[in-house]
């Protein structure tokens, strides 16, 4: 695919090799985003936070990562985020102590809470899932489609529902072996 058909990778803070970012992705603060190697970021992806995106990752179409420059999104090696998912790393508190519009002057704004959302290595987030501020998706954890995650997840566990709850332990041995063969411990 010609370089003209993808996002200008030179705008990123750092970028590995074998990276494709669609020209239809919007990264609001590319100077705050590190992208590893073997990464695909599809059309409609919208990122407003700082971000560290690991190797062998995929962010599917129409994923939203919001929270502004004081929030951070961490995506570990071998992790994926499926289409339509929402990562909420920062949000107004909605306490009625001010306006919740980013266009309002700061002195009239409600409290804004900033956080880090981490999706650890080998984890997967299903389509249309929502991850709330401050959550860590544990290593190898999988979030089912349309789940709402409000708390950290246990490693190698599958979660579904609203709110997300654990339903099954996930196998890990083969994935860990494959990663080791690729040079990852």
Image (cartoon, helix red, strand yellow):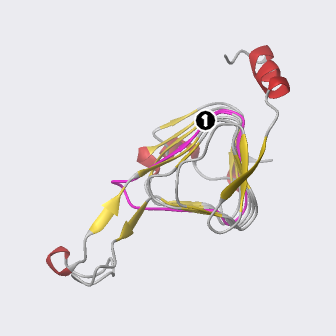
Which residue corresponds to the image point at 60% horizontal and 36% vertical from the top-left? 76
Query: What range is drawn magenta here?
Result: 54-77
Q: Does the magenta stretch include residue 56?
A: yes
- Tell which of 94 and 72 is nearer to you: 94
**Which residue is most to the left?**
107
Q: Is residue 154 above or below residue 71?
A: above
Q: Is residue 50 above or below residue 183?
A: below
The image shows residue 120 at horizontal and vertical percentages of 60, 38
Circle 1 sits on which residue? Answer: 54
Q: Within 10 angstroms of label 1, few (less than 14), some, or many (20 or more) residues?
A: many
Quarter of the image where the C terminus is located: top right
| Res. 55 image quadrant | top right
| Res. 49 image quadrant | bottom left
174 sits to left or right of 29 = right
Q: Does the magenta stretch include residue 98?
A: no
The image shows residue 70 at horizontal and vertical percentages of 33, 54
- Tell which of 23 and 59 is nearer to you: 59
Which residue corresponds to the image point at 52% horizontal and 54% vertical from the top-left? 151
70 sits to left or right of 9 = left
142 sits to left or right of 63 = right
- Tell which of 51 and 19 is nearer to you: 51
Q: Is residue 152 above or below residue 85?
A: above
Quick one: SS at disc 1?
A: loop
The image shows residue 61 at horizontal and vertical percentages of 72, 62
């Amino acid at each position: 695919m010609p370089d003209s058909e993808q996002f200008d990778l030179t705008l990123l803070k750092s970028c590995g090799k074998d990276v494709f970012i669609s020209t239809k992705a919007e990264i609001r603060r590319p100077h705050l985003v590190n992208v590893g190697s073997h990464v695909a970021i599809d059309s409609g992806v919208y990122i407003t936070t700082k971000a560290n995106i690991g190797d062998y990752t995929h962010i599917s179409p129409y994923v939203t990562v919001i929270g502004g420059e004081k929030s951070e999104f961490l995506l570990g090696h071998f992790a994926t985020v499926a289409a339509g998912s929402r990562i909420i790393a920062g949000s107004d508190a909605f306490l009625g102590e001010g306006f919740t519009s980013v266009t309002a002057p700061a002195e009239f704004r409600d409290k804004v809470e900033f956080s880090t959302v981490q999706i650890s290595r080998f984890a997967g987030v299903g389509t249309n899932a929502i991850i709330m501020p401050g959550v860590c998706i544990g290593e190898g954890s999988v979030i089912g489609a349309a789940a709402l995650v409000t708390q950290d997840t246990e490693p190698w566990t599958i979660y579904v529902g609203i709110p997300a709850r654990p339903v099954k332990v996930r196998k890990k041995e083969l994935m860990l072996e494959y990663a080791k063969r690729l040079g990852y411990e």
